[in-house]
Image (cartoon, grey):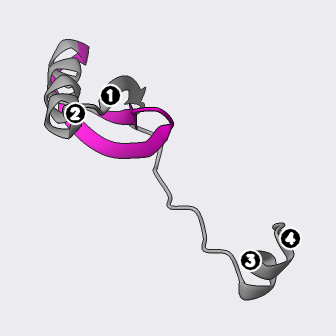
Amino acid sequence: MSRFIAVIHGWHVSSNGFNVHELEAANRQEADEKAAYLTIKRQGDFDKCAYVVVEIKPEETIKRPRKLTWRERIMGRAQ
């Protein structure tokens, strides 16, 4: 089983943001099918969506970015 990340972008007139999903699939084609299904689920009548699938190597780890401190939020820049 390989690991993949699917990034789904939605827009109408302007961007509606991104959704990021971690997928486990046997190959790239299966990951594309899963990402297409998630894209169809998100897509609405006026909301269009597109997706990109990226493969994660076995030795790579995914870390969440740290939260900003109050000072960084108020000043508008990271230390």
Mark 2: which amino acid?
Gln
Residue 6 falls in which quadrant of the image?
A: top left
Q: Which mark is residue 79?
A: 4
Q: Residues within 10 Å of mark 3 (few under 14, many from 20)?
A: few
Q: Was residue 31 drawn as part of the magenta stretch in this picture? A: no
Q: Earlier in the sequence, mark 1 or mark 3?
A: 1
Badge 4: residue crowd in 10 Å (few <14, some 14–19, many ≥20)? few
For label 2, the residue is 43
Check whether the beta carbons of the residues at disc 1 and disc 4 lie within 8 A of each other. Answer: no
Q: Which one is earlier in the sequence, the residue at label 4 or at label 3? A: 3
Q: Secondary structure at mark 1?
A: strand
Q: Most extreme residue toward the top, as rendered? A: 29
From mark 2 to mark 1, how far is it between C-alphas? 6 Å
Location of residue 7 in the rendering, given as x and y in whole percent from the top left corner: 39, 35
| Circles 2 and 1: CB atoms closer than 8 Å | yes
Cα separation, mark 2 vs mark 3, equals 32 Å
Judged by its main secondary structure, the magenta piece is: strand
Badge 2 element: loop
